[in-house]
Image: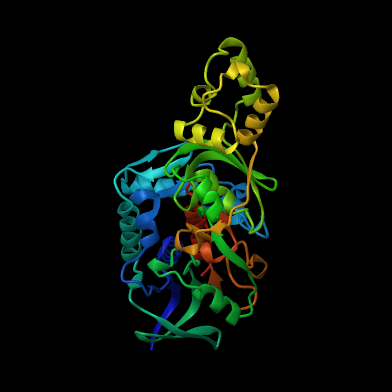
Amino acid sequence: MRSFDLIVLGAGAAGLMCAIEAARRGRKVVVLDHASKPAEKIRISGGGKCNFTHLKATPKNFLSQNPHFCISALKRFTPWDFVGRVIERGIPYYEKTEGQLFCETSAQDIIDMLLDDLQSDGGELWLKTDIRRVDHRDGGFVLDTSEGIMACEKLVVATGGLSIPKMGATGFAYDLARQFGHEIIETRPALVPFTLGPDKLEDFSGLSGVAVEARVTAGKTQFTDGFLFTHRGLSGPAILQISSYWRTGEAVEIDLLPGLNLMEWLLERKQSRGKQSLGNALAELLPRRLSDRWLELNNLRNESNIGDLPNASMDLLSKAVKKWTLLPMGTEGYRTAEVTAGGIDTNGLSSQTMESRLCPGLYFIGECVDVTGWLGGYNFQWAWSSGWAAGQAV
């Protein structure tokens, strides 16, 4: 039997961060993962450039049954703390949009930094290692693995959620949490495109690839960002963001021209350029394929002079563009979801250390916990912060 002070399950962002911190404190650490390569979600993130944090990450950017749970970890290990490590390593990075930081060359730079830190601080990494059973014995843990029986004083679970199963995602963390008495907040795909029913797909046929900036609202939450028609439905940052808050059966409201009073614009155009066709006028504001289809769907003639358009028709068009109400059929599911919303109930965990309140020595960090960030580097910051917090305690 191999014995360690700490075993970390999961060689992703949170697991590696935790293991590094524990190893730096002199703990004998091993990270186990069933995959053949570590940190695959880091590797594919940000189009291969890894959006490794968001400089403005605050608790309000996270969704949880307990919105206060993430405060401690985020305060104690901030985005700037991680940026400091990136700078010290000499990794070139850039700010794509306000606050979103990406690697200049490759996400592999972040992976190499983490792996080198783990190794230099004495931590071990075992890949292609399956966990068959976990038992709590004599104040510690005994694991039956494909590499033999292993024992540890402390056990950290950082195996992620259900998103992107082709990369090996499983419900292991939730099953283990239930084994030790923890409740699971219902999980669902988050940061995921919407799918539409056959009738709506037919309405929007030919629009796949058309992109605009839009404001999307679900309930009391709204996001303004990129919006994209796809051959399966709707995507783009605004849709991915709102998907974390949307529930099946709810309608969303979409403003295809945020920041513009379309009715006022149409009335002004009617006075100043009355002989302009309605189609040409709307195409000044929206991509031509989209403007033509919107007129068609709302029974307005593309070639009509805008000066001849009744105000009632203008009001109809304005509402169709600014207050488009749509009922998504669903989402693309965990197959393409960037993260899993819901997860291990934070009421059973310490916000300071991530330790289980039900089983001393057991910790849960990262995506498997009921803390879900917005799109744009927030979920990586939660991985770094929660991993760091646990790493100080194990």
Observer-nearest of 372 and 362? 372
Q: Is residue 275 visible?
A: yes
Observer-nearest of 275 and 262? 275
Image coordinates of residue 214 in percent, x first then y, are 55, 37
| Image side of residue 359 versus residue 35, left or right | right
| Image side of residue 298 versus residue 50, left or right | right
Image coordinates of residue 386 in percent, x first then y, are 53, 60
Give the number of callouts.
0
Image coordinates of residue 353 in percent, x first then y, are 58, 65
In the picture as drawn, the residue positioned furthest to the top comes out as: 272
**Above or below 58: residue 275:** above
- Quarter occupied by the N terminus: bottom left
| Image side of residue 144 versus residue 270, left or right | left
**Residue 178 sits in quarter:** bottom right
Residue at x 58% of width, y 82% of height: 179
| Image side of residue 178 versus residue 107, left or right | right
**Above or below 197: residue 33:** below
Observer-nearest of 200 and 80? 200
Image coordinates of residue 127 in percent, x first then y, are 33, 74
Q: Is residue 374 visible?
A: no
Residue at x 30% of width, y 54% of height: 108
Residue at x 60% of width, y 26% of height: 260
Residue at x 51% of width, y 73% of height: 171
**Above or below 294: residue 116:** below
